[in-house]
Amino acid sequence: MAGRRITFAGSTVGEPWWTLGEIVAKVLEPHGYQVNITHESFSDNNVRWITGRKAQVGATTPVLIQSAIEGIHEFKGERHRGLASIATIKRPNWVALAVRHETGISDLKEVKERKYPLRILAQSPERGSLLDVVLRTYGTNLKEIESWGGKFMKWSGRMLGGYVREGQVDMMLGNIYLGYTPHNRFWYEATMLYDMRFINFDEALIDKLVKNFGYTRGTLPHGLFRGIDRDIPSVGTDTVYIYCLKSQPAKLVRLIAEGLDKNSDLFKNARSAIYYERDEVWKNPYLPLHPAAAEYYRSKGYME
């Protein structure tokens, strides 16, 4: 049995990556596999767990895969090679920007004009990060905001920080999707406890985010959360990848690809909005399909 124990690189318990790990575990269990899903491979750590051979299979986003391959953003100075896709799963996910109504800010250009000491919740403060690009597009930066008395708080899916509940946050910038998960909980808390004003992304910013981060254009649908009273042009990702190293044994990869297909009903009861679509499962613009996965999808007539 020892040879049939594998590690799945997921994220915090309850997050979509973790949920995909649970589904993979269920489809492999009848074949005698024991799957350990780890939460330590959250965020950009996920790719490192795969290329570092600490996990055999994982789940991550197109944005992180692109950055890891190109050695940019979180992966500056690194190059991750030898990756292969097993399945592309549909997962609606957008980037949202919102400020508390009490600030009186309706356009981020006003932050500079008023030297407003924004207390910001976002994923990373680093130069070149999503937050940095957004702030600089509107004429300011985090260092400047902090000089006016502002503050940065890290958005984490590891159940860290009661910032929102305690009223410490004026502005939020991060992923938004359906499901009360450790990462997404901040949106639920903020939109229920406070009046949040969701800010439009202008065309120039959207173009920049698509080019710099690999996002795709998208529309944040009205009614998704309280305060989203209109369709908002934005960016996001609509897929998540189940992937591995090209060197992973064909038997394991074939069992996962076939198991996900034959048990696609498992996605209907997932805690997050994730979908298995047969005409999309084999498509991946960044990673080649593992040969065993490609063989299976061809045998089913899914691939063009």
Image (cartoon, grey):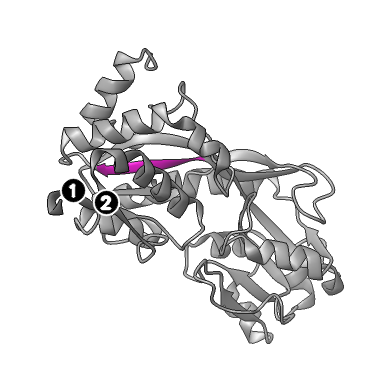
Magenta stretch: includes residue 69: no
For this rendering, which residue is in front, 49 or 204?
Answer: 49
As measured in the structure, the alpha-carbon distance from the residue carrying label 2 to the one carrying label 1 is: 6 Å
Q: Is label 2 in a helix, a strand or a loop?
A: strand
Q: Is label 1 in a helix, a strand or a loop?
A: helix
Q: Amino acid at mark 2?
A: Gln
Q: Quadrant of residue 232?
A: top right
At x 18%, y 33%, the residue is: 251
Looking at the rendered image, the quarter that the C terminus falls into is top left
Position above or below: 107 against 24: below
Q: Which residue is mark 1?
A: 4
Position above or below: 207 against 128: above
**Residue 73 point in image, percent of width and height:** 40, 59
Position above or below: 112 against 178: below
Q: Is residue 107 left or right of residue 82?
A: right
Q: Is residue 78 left or right of residue 162?
A: left
**Residue 120 point in image, percent of width and height:** 65, 73
Q: The magenta stretch spans which residues?
A: 239-244
Determine which of the numbered discs, if any, sits on residue 34 in the image.
2
At x 74%, y 80%, the residue is: 167
Determine which of the numbered discs, if any, sits on residue 69 in the image.
none
Badge 2: few (under 14), some or many (20 or more) residues near its Cα, within 10 Å?
Answer: some
